Image (cartoon, rainbow, N blue to C red):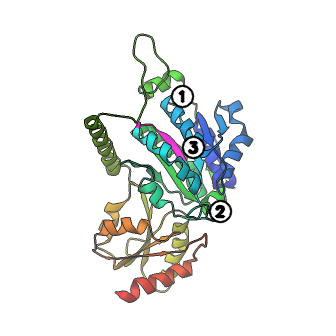
């Protein structure tokens, strides 16, 4: 079958990929700059083509609790929002993690704090990677830097979520959500039958089967000893994810004397900064974390023995830079450069920051 190539926004790519993946249900609420996800799903009427349920809930809180219900039934369900909307979903996300429930959450970040701006930002790193809700839980977090990855990460996100019985988040920013690029759309996949769901998700609550007790899906445990045992099991699962699911991309790193670290749209701008630096004879490389959690700390630590300095480039006041510094453990100088309020830096500004913060202080 010939590849199906379309020109579309990142948000639209998410919606088309969700339909083609065989997603059972989407529950969301509109908020800029991700509203096209819900709008595209409604326009495509997937309930007529694949049986996918698409529902605009009455609020973000309602949407995430609908996700809890769908996931508890073994269904492939997803939601999307933007920064303050994700804040409202945090309690439900913690419940999902505490109940070992797989689902896909999309966050197309905007500036904050508070209502902030509808312009792009990457200031939800703490909220997502550090766990914005309560308790010791982790979200598998994928950071796309292209419209193609917005589409590709839908299937990857669902697969990881079901492999580890854990929520997965696609953490994009307003630039990636709104920009238009060519996308190779994935082929249609059949939705799981009820029999396949029961086989794949034996824990799922699907009523009371004859002859056995019904499954009760909950994050509640009143016995402290059992709650500690449950949390220890979570931590073992997270260690396994850290061992096996780290993803990153390297750009001109083989001979680099200095290293940029950036994700999402920032990484795209950093690629141009690397090219400009090399024209000036500065051997600069870029390492792009694709999984923000699990974070590629091992490869970053390895580069700390090879380069003279690192600059973490983010559309925020300095969030990922904390994890970079933890990874290198003082072996090399690490600084941060960013812009706030929805202002996007240029490659030239990154290069100036590198010279001022790293190169002149060797």
- Circle 1: is it few (<14), some (14-19), or many (20+) Cα within 10 Å? some
Looking at the image, is mark 1 or mark 2 earlier in the sequence?
Answer: 2
Q: As drawn, is 299 to the left or to the right of 4?
A: left
Residue at (45, 60) in percent of width and height: 126
> In this view, which residue lies farthest toward the bottom?
360
Residue 277 in the image: above or below residue 294 = below
Q: Which residue is mark 3?
A: 61
Residue at (49, 86) in percent of width and height: 280
Percent position of residue 351, x then y: 50, 81
> In this view, which residue lies farthest toward the top?
211
1 magenta-colored = no
Nearer to us: label 3 or label 1: 3
Residue range highlighted in magenta = 99-105
Q: Which residue is mark 1?
A: 192
Q: Which residue is mark 2?
A: 118
Of residues 119 and 263, which is closer to you in this image?
Answer: 119
Q: Secondary structure at mark 3?
A: helix
Of residues 294 and 133, which is closer to you in this image?
Answer: 133
């Amino acid at each position: 079958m010939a590849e199906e190539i379309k020109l579309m926004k990142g948000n639209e790519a998410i919606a088309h990929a969700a339909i083609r993946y065989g997603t059972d249900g989407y529950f969301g609420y509109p908020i800029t700059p991700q509203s096209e996800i819900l709008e595209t799903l409604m326009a495509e009427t997937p309930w007529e083509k694949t049986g996918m349920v698409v529902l605009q809930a009455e609020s973000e809180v309602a949407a995430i609790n609908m996700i809890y219900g769908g996931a508890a039934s073994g269904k492939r369900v997803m939601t999307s929002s933007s920064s303050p909307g994700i804040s409202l979903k945090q309690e439900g996300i913690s419940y999902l993690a505490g109940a070992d429930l797989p689902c896909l959450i999309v966050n197309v970040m905007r500036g904050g704090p508070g209502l902030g701006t509808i312009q792009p930002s990457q200031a939800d790193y703490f909220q997502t990677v550090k766990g914005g809700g309560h308790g010791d839980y982790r979200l598998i977090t994928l950071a796309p830097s292209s419209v193609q990855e917005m589409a590709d990460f839908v299937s990857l996100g669902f697969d990881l979520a079901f492999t580890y019985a854990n929520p997965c988040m696609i953490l994009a920013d307003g630039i990636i959500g709104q920009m238009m690029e060519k996308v190779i759309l994935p082929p249609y996949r059949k939705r799981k039958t009820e029999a396949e769901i029961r086989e794949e998700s034996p824990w799922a609550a699907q009523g009371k089967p004859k002859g056995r007790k019904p499954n009760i899906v909950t994050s509640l445990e009143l016995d402290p000893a059992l709650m500690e045992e449950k949390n220890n099991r979570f931590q073992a699962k997270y260690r396994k994810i850290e061992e096996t699911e780290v993803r990153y991309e390297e750009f001109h790193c083989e001979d680099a004397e200095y290293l940029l670290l950036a994700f999402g749209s920032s990484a795209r701008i950093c690629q141009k900064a690397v090219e400009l630096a090399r024209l000036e004879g500065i051997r600069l490389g870029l390492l792009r974390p694709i999984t923000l959690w699990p974070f590629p700390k091992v490869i970053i630590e390895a580069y700390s023995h090879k380069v003279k300095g690192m600059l973490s480039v983010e559309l925020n006041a300095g969030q990922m830079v904390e994890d970079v510094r933890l990874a290198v453990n003082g072996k090399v100088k690490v600084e941060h450069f960013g812009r706030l309020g929805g202002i996007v830096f240029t490659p030239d500004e990154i290069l100036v920051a590198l010279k001022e913060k790293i190169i002149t202080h060797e």
